[in-house]
Every structure is written in structure tokens, then in C-alpha cells.
Image (spheres, helix red, strand yellow):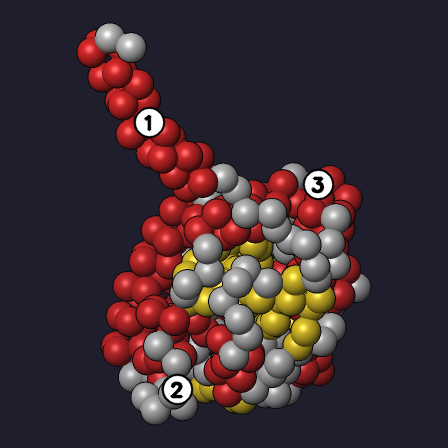
Amino acid sequence: MTKIARRDALKMALAAPMVLAAGRLGAQTAWPTRPVQVITGFGPGGGGDIATRVTFQAVSDILKQPMVVENRTGGNSVVAAQAVLALPHDGYAYLMNGLQQLVTPLLMKDIPIDYAADFQPVTQMVKYPETISVAKDSPWKTFEELMAYAKANPGRIRYGTSGIGGVPHIVAEAIQLYGGVKFRNISYRVAPEIARDLVGGQLDLAVLNVSTLTPMIQSDKVRLLAVGNDTRLKPFPDVPTLAELGLPKANHADWGGIFTATGTPDDIIAQMQAAVAKAAKTPSAYDKLAAQGTFMVGSSTEDFKAFLANWKGVVEEVVREAKISL
């Protein structure tokens, strides 16, 4: 063998391990090969639970593996988060959570979780536009009339909240903070009880997402004065957004997202994100949730990270300025 031939052979031999290594790095993990757990802090039968089950039935059909949805309520999402972190960080355990992922650390100082460090965002799963509503027989026909009364009668308007620091509560506090009014907050165990008491006259105002209020809307028992969303809602084209009414910093929709424990392989996170995004485009799943006022999203992981960063600023300002505490 000539010197040139030997030199070329040596170069090829040295390059071979690098090629093999690159192949291994680019290979996608075979996943999932067994059932995947999805744990949520939302109670059975609620909007978050239904959205999770509908979404992950579609994901199950896409990935050809069971998606086991489990409810672990309590502790403002802490119980569900702990349950996920206690499982192996191998891509087979996910947390479906909402604003609690950001607000819980602000309201609960002594928790055994560092949400920012312990969890990685995967995708925004859904959004639920908020509604600002009154009973059908309410004297207020418009949002402006409601606010005029509230300014003249501080603390007289009664509204309910089922979770301190949830999106409906943050929106209600933002309306008061940036609108220069004061409502009287009454605590409830679950959101459907708020809708019931609004119609029954025990409350004057409700800030609830569309999915929770849908039965009352369908039975024509409530009047929508405003919505929290980036656009007006197609079923209610005459109902303005809070931004249109001069309160852009209160104009927010509720949401639910998928998170997983830090240390989960990046390629598995990418596969889960892609499956949820595909599920969001599945007509049967999308239409089923849209009929209840819940809209599937399936955002990219990077978009979800940007979304969370924006929400973090919103929450920190409202919690600080409105002095929200548990």
C-alpha cells in the first residue's frame, strides 16, 4: 500500500467512530413502548379534566399506546406535581396544569417543589376564554353599566372564585385593579357552584371560563357582558373583549399546558409535543371541546415557553398590586 493510500485509510478509520457517534446522537428514542401517565390537579368532570381526557384519547390513537389520565387534587396543584416528580423522569409521566404552575410559588412559600427548575414545558394544550357575566334578569345590560355601579358602590358587587390565583381570580382582580373598582369576593369549592349561585341570585357577577358557563349559556340564564380572549368569540359576536373595553391588562383566557420533569429526554419531549399538536388538529377532538368553549392549541415548546414568560409577568404584577394571598 502506498503512503497516500495508507494515509487515506487512516483518515477513514479515525472518522468512522465520529460518524457512528453522530448517528447515535441523531437517533430518535423508540417511544412510547408502554402506557404513559398524565396527572392533573383538576377534579374529575371539570373543564380541565375533560380537556385532558379528550386530548389524550386523541394522542393515544396517534401514538398507539394508552394514555392514563389520573386526578390528584389538592395543594393548589402541588399534590399532582409531586406525583409526577416521584415517577422516573423517562418520558412516561406528564403533568397537565394551568396558571397554578406559575402562581403557586408566589402564594405558597414553603412548598417542596421548585416549579421552574423541576419541570420542563412541553406544549400549551388548550385555552378557555373567560366570560364576565351576570344573571339574565340583572339590571346591568352592559359592562360599562356594571363598572359605573361598582365605582359608585365599592364592595357591593358580589362575585365568586373557586381557586385563589387561578385565571378567573386573576382576571377579576385585574378588572378591579386597572378599572378602579372594588368587588366582594366569595370563596367556593368548585366553579359550577358559582354559575349556580349567579343564576340563583346569591352572586351579582361571575368571572368564569366559557366551558364552565356553557350549560347556563345554552339555557339562556346568563348575560355575557365581556370576554377575556384575543378576539371576540364567534358564538357571541356582539360581546366585546376586555381589551376593547379599555382593560387590556385584564384581557386573558384561561389555559392548560403539559409539563414534564426536568431530565426527561429532549427527543421524547419533542415527540409528545408533536403528538399533542397533531391531536389539536383532529376534527373529532377539536370539535368536541370547542362545543364546550374549550379550544385545543398544541403550541410548539418554544412558543409555550414564551407564553409562560409573558404570563409570569402578568401574575407577578397582579398578585403584588392586588395583595393576593392564600
As drawn, the label of residue 89 is none
Q: Residues within 10 Å of mark 3 (few under 14, many from 20)?
A: some
Taking the spot 32% from the left edge, 65% from the top edge, the residue there is 312
User: From this viewpoint, is residue 252 visible?
Assistant: no
Q: Amino acid at mark 3?
A: Thr
Q: Residues within 10 Å of mark 2 (few under 14, many from 20)?
A: few
Of tags 2 and 3, the one toward the viewer is 2
x, y percent for residue 316:
29, 71
Q: Is residue 56 above or below residue 73?
A: above
Q: CA distance from mark 2 to mark 3?
A: 38 Å
Dot 2: element: loop
Q: CA distance from mark 3 to mark 1?
A: 49 Å
Q: CA distance from mark 2 to mark 1?
A: 52 Å
Asked whether, in this view, residue 50 is left or right of residue 85, the answer is right
Q: Amino acid at mark 2?
A: Pro
Reading the image, the residue beneath label 1 is: 13
x, y percent for residue 305:
37, 53
Q: Is residue 153 above or below residue 297?
A: below
Q: Earlier in the sequence, mark 2 or mark 1?
A: 1
Q: Amino acid at mark 1?
A: Ala
Q: Earlier in the sequence, mark 3 or mark 1?
A: 1
Reading the image, the residue beneath label 3 is: 282
Reading the image, the residue beneath label 2 is: 112
User: Residue lying furthest left in this view?
Assistant: 3
Tell me the quarter of the picture where residue 193 sits: bottom right
User: Residue lying furthest front in this view?
Assistant: 1
Quadrant location of the C terminus in the rendered image: bottom left
Of tags 3 and 1, the one toward the viewer is 1
